[in-house]
Image: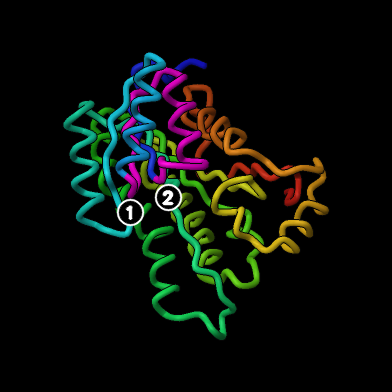
């Protein structure tokens, strides 16, 4: 796929699951990758895997709930590679509870990581993209940001907000040849979804027209497409990677 050789990507939540798959796929397509997460050990293992395969990566410890770590991490990535072309806002957490029992701290933690973090990361890298008049911002949302989900008022609100952020920023930066899109996964086999109640997963599985769950690579391939030159006329969109469970 054209357009990724020589590009520089920053991927958050890259130590496992969808983020890790995105980092590997973008590196395989020719991008240099700054991999960011809270686990330095896992990041170093991922960076080594990428470099052993002939790619280039740098591990950057980053908690996206920390504005200071976001700023320092983005600066370190730009210092290392000279620019940021592609931002993948993937890092996310859950703190599930019925709304009548949800603690304010659990609401705040999810909003801080899943919505405020991506906002701050966009601010941290947008100058590099504007300067070169090229950029791809890809936010990993969720089907629950489109449908809601009982017990996940904080998570669903953050992901719905991320979709709104995607469209707002897309309008702001389109004139600079920067696209901003979201990918909304459905039921994907990851560490995060492994803790979902069995009855919830079973009910969702029955509702998936394709009849099976997705993988982290399914999401990563969608991210790679949106990061490419071929997706240059797509912005402000939500690409559903959900097996058909939500259409339209």
Q: Are marks 1 and 2 in contact (CB under 8 Å)?
A: yes
In the visual, does 130 lie left or right of 197? left
Which residue is found at the position 42% from the left and 65% from the top?
111
Give the Cα distance between marks 1 and 2: 7 Å
**Please, is residue 212 above or below residue 66 in the view?**
above
Judging depth in this view, the residue of 147 and 126 nearest the camera is 147
| Whether residue 18 can be seen here | yes
Total numbered circles: 2
Magenta stretch containing residue 239, yes or no?
no
Which residue is found at the position 79% from the left and 48% from the top?
208
Which residue is found at the position 50% from the left and 39% from the top?
235
**Please, is residue 154 above or below residue 82 in the view?**
below
The image position of residue 243, as x and y in percent, is 73, 42
Residue pointed to by mark 2? 91
The image position of residue 37, as x and y in percent, is 35, 46
| Magenta stretch, residue numbers | 13-39
Looking at the image, tell me whether mark 1 or mark 2 is earlier in sequence order: 1
The image position of residue 38, as x and y in percent, is 33, 49
The image position of residue 115, as x and y in percent, is 41, 59
Which residue is found at the position 65% from the left and 71% from the top?
150
Tell me the SS state at disc 1: loop
Q: Any mark on residue 64, and which?
A: 1
> Residue 80's quadrant in the figure?
top left
Check the image and tell me how it is coloured: rainbow
Q: Any mark on residue 180, and which?
A: none
């Amino acid at each position: 796929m054209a357009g990724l050789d020589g590009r520089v990507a920053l991927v958050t939540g890259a130590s496992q699951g969808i983020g890790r798959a995105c980092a590997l796929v973008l590196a395989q397509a020719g991008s240099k990758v700054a991999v960011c997460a809270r686990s330095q050990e896992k990041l170093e293992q991922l960076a080594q895997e990428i470099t052993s395969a002939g790619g280039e990566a740098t591990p950057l410890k980053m908690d996206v709930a920390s504005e200071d770590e976001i700023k320092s991490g983005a600066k370190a990535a730009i210092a290392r590679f000279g620019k940021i072309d592609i931002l993948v806002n993937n890092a996310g957490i859950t703190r599930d509870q019925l709304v009548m029992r949800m603690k304010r701290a659990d609401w705040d933690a999810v909003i801080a990581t899943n919505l405020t973090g991506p906002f701050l990361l966009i601010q941290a890298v947008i100058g590099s993209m504007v300067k070169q008049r090229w950029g791809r911002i890809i936010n990993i949302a969720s089907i629950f940001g489109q449908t809601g989900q009982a017990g996940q008022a904080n998570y669903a609100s953050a992901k719905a907000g991320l979709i709104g952020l995607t469209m707002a920023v897309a309008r702001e930066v389109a004139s600079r040849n920067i696209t901003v899109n979201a990918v909304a996964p459905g039921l994907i086999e990851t560490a995060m979804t492994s803790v979902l109640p069995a009855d919830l997963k079973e009910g969702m599985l029955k509702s998936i027209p394709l009849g099976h769950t997705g993988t982290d690579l399914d999401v990563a391939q969608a991210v790679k497409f949106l990061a490419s030159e071929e997706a240059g006329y797509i912005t402000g969109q939500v690409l559903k990677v959900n097996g058909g469970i939500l259409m339209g």
